[in-house]
Amino acid sequence: MIPPDIHNSTADERRNYVLLQWECQNNCEACGRCKILKGMDAETLYADYIEGKRSYIDITLEHRKKY
């Protein structure tokens, strides 16, 4: 699923996308989402995307570089 463009979507649409993409699957051994987030809350990590300041992919790539 492609993230909504920051110029053609609302903050609620972007927030819903983030929450859906990072929703807990209740199967930690198979999922790995928590490991990728490194203990961060997805809504906090992607706050700039939700607010329309930065693209989803920019934040994702920056997070990957850090960890």
Image (spheres, rainbow, N blue to C red):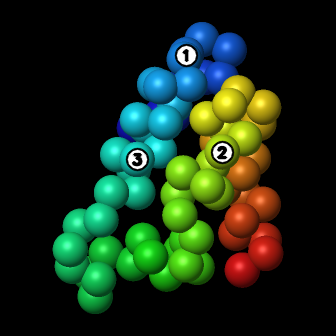
Local crowd size for mark 1, using a 10 Å CA cut-off: few (<14), some (14–19), many (≥20): few
Q: In the image, 16: left or right of 8?
A: left
Q: Count the labels in the image.
A: 3
- Per the model, the C-alpha gap separating discs 3 and 2 is 11 Å
Depth order, front residue of 7/61: 7
From where the camera sits, is residue 1 visible? yes
Q: Nearer the viewer, mark 2 or mark 1?
A: 2
Q: In the image, 34: left or right of 58?
A: left
Q: Which badge, 3 or 1, comes first in the chain's sequence?
A: 1
Residue 22 is situated, as x and y percent measured from the top left of the image, at: 41, 57
Q: Which badge, 2 or 1, comes first in the chain's sequence?
A: 1
Residue drawn at x 54%, y 17% is 10
Which quadrant of the rendered structure holds the C terminus? bottom right
Task: Using the image, tell me which numbered label, if any, was put on residue 9.
Answer: 1
Q: Secondary structure at mark 3?
A: helix
Task: Using the image, tell me which numbered label, if any, was put on residue 19.
Answer: 3
Q: Is residue 8 above or below residue 6?
A: above
Which quadrant of the rendered structure holds the N terminus? top left
The picture quadrant where one finds residue 27 is: bottom left
Task: Using the image, tell me which numbered label, if any, was put on residue 21.
Answer: none
Type of amino acid under label 3: Leu
- Per the model, the C-alpha gap separating discs 2 and 1 is 15 Å
Residue drawn at x 53%, y 64% is 41
Q: Is residue 6 above or below residue 7?
A: below
Task: Using the image, tell me which numbered label, if any, was put on residue 47.
Answer: 2
- Per the model, the C-alpha gap separating discs 3 and 1 is 15 Å
Type of amino acid under label 1: Ser
Residue 58 is situated, as x and y percent measured from the top left of the image, at: 75, 47
Q: Secondary structure at mark 1?
A: loop
Residue drawn at x 53%, y 58% is 42
From where the camera sits, is residue 57 visible? no
Q: Secondary structure at mark 2?
A: helix
